[in-house]
Amino acid sequence: AAPMSPRHLALLGHRLASPGATGVGRYYTELVRGVAAAMAPGDRLVVASTREAGHPTSLPIGVDHRTIPGPRKLVTLGWALARRPRVDRALGRPDLVHAMHVWAPTPTRARLVVTIHDLMPFRHPQWYGRVENWSFRRAVAYARDHADLVLTDSENEGRQLVAAGIERGRLRVVPLGVDNGFRRRPTVSERDRVCAEYGVEPGRYLVAVGAVSERKNLPVVLRALAGVDPDRLGSPGLLVIGPSWAGSERVEALVADLGLTDRVRFTGYVPGEALPVLIGAALALVHPSQDEGFGLTPLEAMAAGVPALVADAGSLREIVGDAGLVLDGADPDAWAEAIDSVATDAGRRQALVEAGQRRQSTFTWPRTAAATVAVYDELLAR
């Protein structure tokens, strides 16, 4: 059947004013852009969030931004406890609501699509606060009982969602995309300037990207680094990019205990334009996460022309395929050997770079948006 036209769609996000550099924040930004581009004459697109400081900065022309009235915590508590207030009136009574992140139930009479990126709080409740875990469980239960279709990022998470009670027939796997900024090659002078600013030597350091926390499992790479000949890498030999979260002080203490103070540098948050340059100038990305619902960072490294060394955890093996080195996240010796091989075997490193280029090219944001709009049309045609 042909999709209904004109379509009135509402995309609901959480903290749209400051999506930041997180995967979910990038998903909001890119999905809104892609869906807006797919709108036909007469279609209406509303993007909404609960009340927050600031206004979404990067909304495309013609997109109507709405705020759900009432204090954010009170609204989400009402959704979680009483499934009230419904969002329909605040959103201008859309035909379809897409909750782009499952942080709270989304009560609506419209057709409902919910994206559940991963079930981390189910698998690792210790990584989250009590209220966060409770709200997430309510939101997943609501999606299980009320969503017309549920989107997720990987086949691995799809299997987890089926195990959590969502029928396979209501699930659609829509992979994320890689930002084109990672595919752009900087000039040599731009690369050298950014590397000098962060105190690293191009091609002579490993890079790790993500919040410094227990979940990211950096100790396995630190122990591996302690076993790698310092001459194989520059100084520092490991650049850790990302904010400090719970558990970061233990990571920093381990750096000192292993005598790696001169060989590891923590940058904190790095602005968007410098990040692809720092990844692309590295010898390799190390990504030893304990769990990932998708694994965007290894794909970004591949797009930037750098080999990805990842842990065999969560969806990482599925996402990198045979284009990265998939290693045991609990075996520092395996990581030391892999680091040594990319540092000394130029042929092997180049083969990984070329395989990575082929692999990442299939993950684009326009493809993510097109697959998502196809889900909307499938629902609206019913």
Image: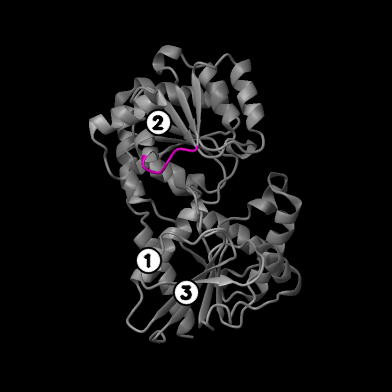
Q: Which span of residues is magenta-colored?
A: 269-273
Q: Residue under label 1, please give it.
A: 60
Rendered view: 64 above or below 7: above
Rendering quarter of residue 236: top left
Residue 365 x %, y %: 38, 58
The residue where tag 3 is placed is 46
Which of label 1 and label 2 is nearer to you?
1
The tag earlier along the polypeptide, 1 or 2, is: 1
Could you tell me what secondary structure mostly forms the magenta stretch?
A: loop
Label 1 is placed on what type of residue?
Answer: Pro
Measure the alpha-carbon separation of dots 1 and 2. 35 Å
Q: Quadrant of residue 212?
A: top right
Residue found farthest to the front: 54
Task: Identify the secondary structure beneath mark 1.
Answer: loop
Secondary structure of the residue carrying numbered label 2: strand
Q: Secondary structure at mark 3?
A: strand
**Which of pointers 3 and 2 lies earlier in the amino acid sequence?**
3
Q: How many marks?
A: 3
Tell me whether the residue at label 3 lies in contact with that at label 1, contact meaning CB atoms closer than 8 angstroms. Answer: no
Q: Of circles 3 and 2, which is in front?
A: 3
Q: Amino acid at mark 3?
A: Val
Q: Is residue 57 magenta?
A: no
Res. 284 mark? 2
